[in-house]
Image (spheres, grey):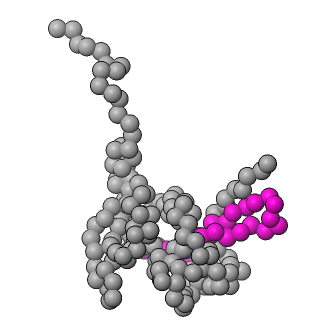
């Protein structure tokens, strides 16, 4: 049996209607209130990624999630919005898109602001290597937590996650 594969691509104008119709809640609008988002602008800037699931049993690939960002002149990236299609939150798809965004843009840093009361969104960025909590701000009516990714922070997190050799194994005693 063939398994479903995933494909990440830049969004195209044909994706706009599906995104506006099918995305219920996002990083920028967790309550799922109607978005007045202009996906056209992000598509024109090539700053909107789509994650598709390709199932051999289905005639067309199925869009699972998206991420929108803005690239600054200094090479840093700000994640503006992200979300998954349908009612179910898909943290794995969002994490995959964030990792692909970092791989694709090779930024000096990535900044994202997450509403403090949105645990599922906080966990997405707390679980990704290299994202560190750097502060908070109040933007009516919610507190927002600021997470920043840097290549150095990712290296530190990766080193901390590597297993350390157990004491006494593989070590030679020095002669006295």
Give the percent coordinates (x, y) of residue 175. Answer: 21, 8
Looking at the image, the residue that sits furthest to the front is 87
Q: Is residue 43 visible?
A: no
In the picture, the quarter occupied by the C terminus is top left
Residue 135 placement, left or right of 115: left
Residue 30 placement, left or right of 88: left
Figure disc tally: 0
Give the percent coordinates (x, y) of residue 114. Answer: 39, 74
Residue at 28% x, 74% y is: 136
Q: Is residue 52 visible?
A: yes
Please say whether residue 69 is one of the residues in the magenta stretch. Answer: yes
**Magenta segment range?**
44-72
Looking at the image, the residue that sits furthest to the left is 176
Residue 10 placement, left or right of 153: right
Residue at 28% x, 67% y is: 134
The answer to whether 15 is drawn above or below residue 106 in the figure is below
Toward which corner of the image does residue 150 lie, by quadrant? bottom left
Residue at 36% x, 19% y is: 170
Looking at the image, the residue that sits furthest to the top is 176
Give the percent coordinates (x, y) of residue 30. Answer: 47, 80
The answer to whether 9 is drawn above or below residue 24 in the figure is above
Q: Nearer the viewer, residue 3 or 13?
A: 3
Q: Nearer the viewer, residue 165 or 10?
A: 165
Q: Nearer the viewer, residue 141 or 71?
A: 141
Please say whether residue 153 is one of the residues in the magenta stretch. Answer: no
The answer to whether 129 is drawn above or below residue 105 in the figure is above
Give the percent coordinates (x, y) of residue 166. Answer: 33, 27
């Amino acid at each position: 049996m063939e398994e479903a594969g995933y494909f990440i691509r830049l969004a195209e104008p044909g994706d706009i209607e599906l995104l506006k119709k099918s995305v219920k809640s996002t990083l920028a609008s967790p309550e799922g209130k109607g978005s007045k988002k202009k996906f056209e602008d992000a598509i024109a800037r090539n700053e909107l990624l789509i994650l598709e699931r390709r199932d051999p049993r289905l005639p067309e690939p199925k869009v699972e999630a998206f991420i929108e960002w803005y690239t600054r002149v200094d090479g840093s990236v700000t994640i503006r919005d992200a979300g998954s299609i349908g009612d179910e939150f898909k943290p794995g798809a969002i994490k995959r898109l964030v990792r692909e965004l970092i791989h694709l843009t090779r930024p000096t840093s990535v900044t994202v602001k997450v509403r403090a009361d949105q645990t599922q969104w906080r966990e997405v960025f707390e679980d990704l290597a290299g994202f560190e909590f750097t502060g908070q701000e109040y933007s009516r009516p919610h507190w927002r937590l600021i997470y920043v990714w840097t290549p150095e922070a990712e290296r530190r997190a990766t080193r901390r996650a590597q297993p350390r050799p157990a004491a006494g194994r593989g070590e030679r005693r020095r002669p006295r």
